[in-house]
Amino acid sequence: MKFQFNFSSRRSAVKSYLALTSWWYEAALFSFLVTTVLGWSTLFFISAHIILVGLTIIATSIGAGLLNLWLFARTYYSNQPIAITVKEALGRASVNFPNLISFDFLVTLYLSTGFILNRDSLLQAIRQLISSPHNFSFLSRLQINKAKLAAAIEQSVWPKLTWSDFASRTMKVANKLKSDQIEPAHALGALLMHPAIKSQLRSVGLVEEDILFTAWWQTELRRVIEFKRRWWDERHLLAFSGIGLSWASGFTPFVDRFTRFPRGSFWDSVLYGHEGKLNDIINTLARQRQSNVLLVGDPGVGRLGIVRQLAWLIQTSQAHAALIGQRVLYVNAGELIAQGTTGASQMSLITRALNEMERAGNIIVIIDGLNAVLGETGEQRINLTDILMPFLASATVRVIVLTSSDDYHLRLKSNEEIIQFFEVVQVPSLSPDATLRRLALTIQKIERQAHLFVPYLTLRALVQDTVSILPHIPFPERAYDFLEEAIVLAQNRHDKTLLPEHVEQSISRKIGVNLGQLRGREREQLLNLEEIMHRRMVNQDNAIKTLTHAIIRARTEVRSIKRPIGAFLFLGPTGVGKTETAKTLAESYFGSEDHMVRLDMSEFQGTDSVGRLIGSANQPVGRLTSLIADHPFTVLLLDEFEKASSEAHQLFLQVFDEGNITDIAGRQFSFLHTIIIATSNAGAELIWQSVKDGHVPPKFEETLKNHILSQNILRPELLNRFDAVITYSPLSMDHIRQIAALMLRSLNKRLDAEHGVTIVITPELIEFLVSIGYHPEFGARPMNRAIQDTVEFAVAQKILQGSIQPGQQVTLIPAELSALTRKS
Amino acid sequence: MLIDYLHWQFVLSPNWFIKLLWNLERASVRFFSISLMLRTLLSYWHKDAMAFTGGSLGKLATIILWNTISRLIGLIIRSAVIAIWLVIQVIFIPLSLITLVALLLWPLLVIVGLAIGLSLLLV
């Protein structure tokens, strides 16, 4: 697209605006207005001399004239519709840039360039944009220092930038944010997103999406403020409740005793992400029949915010014409039922309440949890269902029931009698993006109350760092929970700014994983991962190399935020170190072996495998989902992966692709912070035949993959989702010797810690252990047993006999140990 | 600038002001629920009525009396609301029209004011 920069049509407008809103003009206006007030006061209260009358009338006329022109400047130019929208301009071959930009931006450009466009004026425009009051909040939210930014842009961006390039980039940002016109925030966003400055922004933890988000945030807040200022708008003038709307409807004195809207949260005030749900509810309520809503969602998902907004819209007659004059009552069903002592009296109370509401004729009743009304017991449930049904069918009472996902899926969904009267509106956990936007739009109120400044990176941490933890608490509640905790932490330290570190610490306190340390350590761990793993692993150089390279690649190059850290398939015979690798990885990457969880996939072979993994109607808690909920930062070891059913494999396809799964109750579980390792003995025969002395033939992984596919052990789409397929070679006798030494060293550590004794690791001892613990087909596994049966047993005997004391070193003689094995 | 000013003064401003008046008028109708008041002028007060389910003539008379009183209460209160709204209209509409005329004549009033002021000084 070709840009023109013809400012002639808007030059005079800018000049007039600047003249009529300049400080001297406003000072003159103010002086004349004060003179007018003083003049007329004098005329009324002191003296009405003819000259004074003449002067007062002149001052009044001049003041009125100045006011007239000032109002013209203030209201005319900034409200003028732009000649062409950004969207329209995109389809044209040539466009005049000044026609696309907002009046504020036009003024900013005039002040810096005088509309003379050259290299120097471009630099002036950049400086003006950075220091413009319109962009003050933009930069402070990103915590970017103005002077440093100006210097960086001047050095890196400006030499490569032309006016056309600047216009084109600015227009792209405005288009991405679906804005009709180009605002100063879009221009600053375009500068910050320039490739030349990318690395500098990355060094402070910012990427393109962050800049784009902040530009959206600032323009959105501005739009909200602008709207609030327009007091004359009909949406403001007509937003109230008329008097006497309920005079033609009946009283509800009995029900009123049990109605109380729960206190709301700050984040209830903004409905971002749930607008569609609110519309669905309004449309259902406005129907003539079947106008009842079952609002399904877990506590914390924002159900109350939706019904609160609904109540406000109905009260101010903005929801729907059919709902004008309706009263929204939030009935505390538990309190109502608690008034009755027996089942019969409780039913009579419910009947009385329902009768009263039906008679009133204008009630929309909200009940939190239908189970509270229906009860759990069989007979009562049947009776109440019979009582409730006529009311649910009636057009005079509208019912909104709030229920949790569990209750809906496990109980209500199967109750056809009741469910037929409801339109089900499901409110799932808010997406991370929508949560971030809702946080951004509500944060100002929270800041005012907490007396803290919350920069963008803190908001991002609140969402990004919590996305994979505590999945039973939905978004946005999860993010706001941590926000509140972080605020308390910052307030206790008398900090004025809420930093991402506060969020990290509140997460660390809650789940015991220090994200800050994890991140700080990650780079170092990644660089040294291969070396760290070799300290614990014998042989398997090729496997470790492939694994560490794949992890480094996955973390640093093309890592998608929506995938697990890595997903690997370990293939090899039994006892060659597959599980040991997973443990070592957990220790070296997450800091402890405890960060490894294991699932034996051979248990998930039947048709119910998916239900057992993610939960089902009969078994609400799934094995996989509960494991990942409890251990979000983990190495997930899937033993004997090939034995699981194809449905279970399909489930993992989603995990590898999207990094999350949704359980039966609609809760989302994230695998973003997990390393998934699937192990399998499949192809062990081929490995035995092909891998000699630990040397894996070239391109053996491909051969192995083809073998697995040809045998239908795993489907190609699943096999291709693994970041790497890693082959474990069988262990030779020499490897077993090294493993024996490693195991003995590990035993020594334990003995030293518990009893203060150690054993002397001699070549004879190792040879003895190898002689009884080397079985090539079982790898290193028999060695563990051999050490337990001989060395550990012998040491235990000596400790019991009191023949060794703390601080002593024990030398074990193979002949003695040999005798032990014969005895056992 | 002059064309912009004339456009603003004689087209946009009066247009905006008329829209404002119209919205205020709608707001007053909504605030006093005039449409509902007229539709339910003779309705029972809060549906407070009794149904005759048989019995003596005396009981019927009592029910009729009670229901009439309920309607009467409704009528009085609703009429009062409509009356208050009408009084406000009587004040609001002329004031709005005067303000609209003043807004249209603002530049002229400035010139006339200056002329009067100067003439008083010169006298």
Image (cartoon, coloured by chain):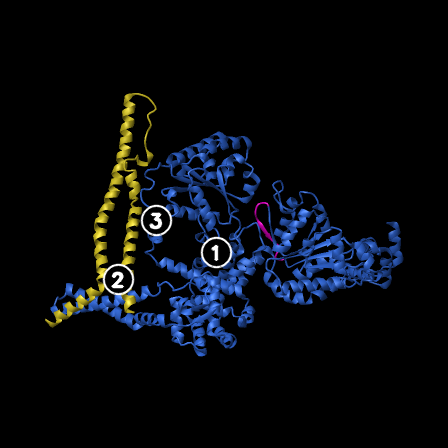
Chain colours: A blue, B yellow
Residue A585 relative to residue A244: left or right: right
Q: Give the residues in magenta.
A: A664-673
What residue is rendered at 53% in x and 72% in y?
A197
Q: Residue A438 shows which numbered tag?
A: 1
Residue A424 relative to residue A811: left or right: left
Q: Residue A410 shows which numbered tag?
A: none
Q: Position of residue A73 (x, y in %)?
A: 31, 67
Q: Residues within 10 Å of mark 2 (few under 14, many from 20)?
A: some
Tell me if residue A4 comes above or below residue A610 in the rendering. Answer: below
| Same subunit: marks 3 and 1 | yes
Residue A126 relative to residue A55: left or right: right
Q: Position of residue A523 (x, y in %)?
A: 64, 66
Q: How far separated are the C-alphas under marks 3 and 1?
A: 25 Å
Looking at the rendering, which quadrant does residue B36 occupy? Answer: top left
Looking at the rendering, which quadrant does residue B102 occupy? Answer: bottom left
Subunit ID for the residue under disc 3: A
Q: Is residue A44 covered in magenta?
A: no
Secondary structure category for the residue under label 2: helix
Q: Residue A240 shows which numbered tag?
A: 3
Amino acid type, residue under disc 1 in the picture = Arg
